[in-house]
Amino acid sequence: MFYLAVADCTGHGVPGAFLSMVGTTLLNQIVAQNPRHLPGTILEQLHDGVLHSLRQTSRRLEIDDGMEICLCRLDDSKVTFAGARPPALCCIPTGNRRWDLEEIKGDRRTIGGGRKREGWQYTNHELELPRGAMLYLTTDGYADQGQPAVRTLWSAAPA
């Protein structure tokens, strides 16, 4: 079993790099402390950690930086996905050079951004991927930088 994440932080340059470091550190700590948690639970803890780290709970500060993230827990052919905005895409072979494409939507809430969400949870989506299926995690990071409208796709195919 292992986790796979694709994240896109707000901001460019130093602010974006700082938020990337904060997010990576928090994500590693959360997974190390609870290695069997579902991705939705990890995203909830990451959201709280970013709010606390950036002091976004204080009304005096107006820091609304955050991130969008796809997080998967892969365990053999079983995948559990949770997304803070971006979707995951599954390409499943149906035979004779044909594929079915399924979009698994992420939740419409980001990580961080100064909004405490009491009682709200990220949705876990469980999938059973057959041999040869491909899982794509997305980000709009390039498109948000004013580049041509390109969606980057990261592929992870279970063994």
Image (spheres, rainbow, N blue to C red):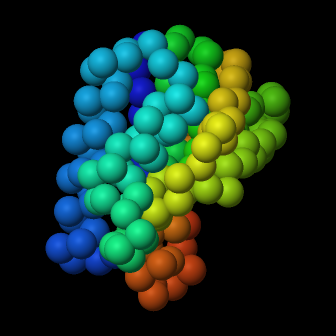
Locate residue 17 relative to residue 31 in the image: left or right.
Answer: left
Locate residue 141 relative to residue 106 in the image: left or right.
Answer: left
**119 versus 144 height, above or below:** above
The part of the image, by quadrant, that contains residue 8 is bottom left
Answer yes or no: is residue 88 visible. Answer: no
**70 versus 20 height, above or below:** above
**Which residue is depicted at the point 77% across and 42% down?**
102
User: Number of labelled discs?
Assistant: 0
Answer yes or no: is residue 93 visible. Answer: yes
| Residue in front for this viewpoint, 32 or 86 | 32
**Residue 146, x across and y down, in percent:** 45, 88
**Which residue is depicted at the point 29% across and 77% down?**
12
The part of the image, by quadrant, that contains residue 99 is top right
Locate residue 6 relative to residue 116 in the image: left or right.
Answer: left
**Residue 104, x across and y down, in percent:** 72, 43
Q: Farthest residue in the bottom direction? A: 146
**Which residue is depicted at the point 48% across and 78% down?**
144
**25 versus 79 height, above or below:** below
**Residue 32, x across and y down, in percent:** 28, 20
**Which residue is depicted at the point 35% across and 74% down?**
60
**Residue 66, x across and y down, in percent:** 42, 62
| Residue in front for this viewpoint, 26 or 93 | 26
- Which image quarter holds the N terminus? top left
